[in-house]
């Protein structure tokens, strides 16, 4: 009669053989899945490709390595592309719906003729039961934006972008369609003209897009989303860009010309020095600055650091930014396609 040790060893051998077969079968299916996804993108006008695709990670991971990956869309009004030296996708055998990705080496994204270069991208993707991306979180490091639109360029240390779909699709404008987050640190802008602010700057943003997601965001879909009551609910917006510090929350929407309008409640400090700089540079008319200074004086209170702190409504309307009743500066127009 076989000993207990022999039976245990035999069981472990059978179990290990079965797991190895499972791993290699799943690796093959995952490779086929990546190929099918690329074919689907090509059918939608997006060139999705790579030079070489390999799998490893046995026994505790599935790891796909793609050399020279690329995504390119040249058709339509919003041409864009992304290319990198390498891309690594990783998933655990017992958690295949969650994928970690890492892309090292020089890479570039091109959108409407503007190039954004960065050195590293990493993050996670979570898939729902139908294989659709339900949640994404990505961090880009050491970014550089090429010159254009009045800028000689811009750099940043890190940019984190995250988005999450709700568990149920929105039925109307009162239901969330997308949760978004953004964090930008170490932003420095090189402008062809002097700016009233000094870098580096830090920005943090948390918001919920209400109503059905306008995908892609072209003029027709954005107009339909606006007409259905769609809004962007800003839970928090924080900006530190010397001399200004701002914390705000509120609601943004689109006007008949698809330009932003909205109202926020904000807490500001450094607004006095900023206003003086805006006047000196000719960005704000002296009469508007005088009105703003009076309003600021009525609303200011000493902050915890001793600097004057202002709690005031911030509005965007008719193409201008207002703090209280004071019109401060024009808001750049968005050229939707």
Image (cartoon, helix red, strand yellow):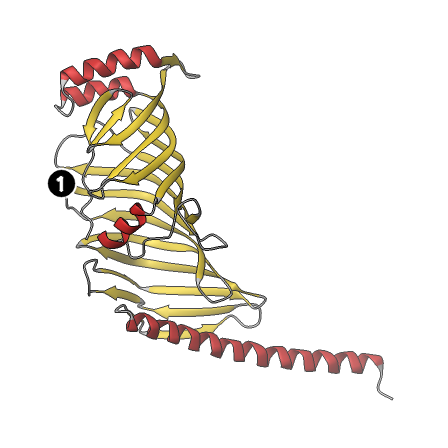
Q: Is residue 166 left or right of residue 184?
A: right
Tell me how many marks there are.
Answer: 1
Q: Is residue 327 above or below residue 169?
A: above
Query: Which one is in front, 279 or 219?
Result: 219
Which residue is painted at 35% across and 54% down in the image? 120
Q: Is residue 168 above or below residue 55?
A: above
Mark 1, secondary structure of its residue: loop
Q: Residue furthest right?
A: 1
Q: Position of residue 126 (x, y in %)?
A: 48, 59
Q: Residue at x 29, y 46 (%)?
A: 227
Residue 75: horizontal and vertical position, in percent?
A: 19, 65
Q: Which residue is labeled 1 in the image?
A: 150
Q: Quadrant of residue 278?
A: top left
Q: Is residue 45 left or right of residue 240?
A: left
For the N terminus, which image quadrant? bottom right
Q: Position of residue 219 (x, y in %)?
A: 22, 52
Q: Left or right of 308: which side holds 133?
A: right
Whether residue 218 is visible to the viewer of this picture, yes or no, is no
Look at 16% across and 20% down and name the residue there: 279
Q: Is 245 in front, or is 222?
A: 222
- Indicate the position of residue 21 as horizontal and vertical percent values: 58, 81
Residue nearest the viewer, comparing 217 with 106: 217
């Amino acid at each position: 009669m076989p000993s207990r040790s022999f039976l245990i060893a035999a069981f472990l051998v059978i179990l290990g053989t079965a797991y190895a077969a499972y791993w290699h079968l799943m690796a093959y299916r995952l490779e086929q899945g990546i190929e099918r996804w690329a074919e689907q993108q090509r059918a939608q006008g997006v060139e999705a490709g790579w030079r070489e695709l390999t799998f490893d990670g046995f026994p505790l991971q599935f790891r796909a390595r793609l050399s020279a990956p690329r995504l390119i869309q040249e058709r339509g009004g919003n041409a864009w592309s992304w290319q990198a030296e390498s891309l690594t996708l990783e998933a655990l055998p017992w958690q295949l719906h969650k994928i970690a990705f890492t892309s090292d080496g020089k890479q570039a994204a091109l959108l409407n003729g503007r190039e954004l270069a960065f050195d590293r991208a990493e993050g996670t993707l979570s898939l729902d039961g139908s294989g659709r991306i339900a949640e994404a979180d990505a961090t880009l490091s050491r970014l550089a934006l090429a010159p254009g639109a009045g800028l000689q360029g811009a750099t940043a240390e890190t940019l984190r972008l995250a988005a999450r779909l709700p568990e149920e699709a929105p039925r109307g404008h009162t239901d969330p369609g997308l949760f978004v987050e953004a964090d930008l640190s170490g932003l420095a802008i090189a402008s062809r003209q002097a700016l009233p602010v000094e870098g580096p700057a830090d920005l943090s943003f948390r918001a919920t897009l209400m109503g059905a997601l306008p995908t892609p965001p072209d003029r027709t879909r954005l107009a339909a989303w606006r007409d259905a009551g769609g809004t962007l609910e800003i839970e928090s917006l924080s900006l530190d860009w010397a001399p200004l510090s701002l914390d705000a929350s509120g609601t943004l929407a689109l006007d008949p010309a698809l330009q932003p309008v909205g109202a926020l409640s904000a807490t500001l400090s450094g607004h006095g020095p900023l206003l003086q700089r805006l006047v000196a540079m000719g960005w704000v008319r002296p009469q508007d600055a005088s009105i703003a200074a009076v309003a600021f004086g009525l609303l200011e209170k000493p902050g915890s650091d001793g600097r004057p702190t202002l709690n005031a409504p911030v509005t965007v309307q008719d193409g201008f930014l207002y703090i209280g009743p004071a019109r401060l500066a024009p808001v750049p127009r968005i050229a939707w396609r």
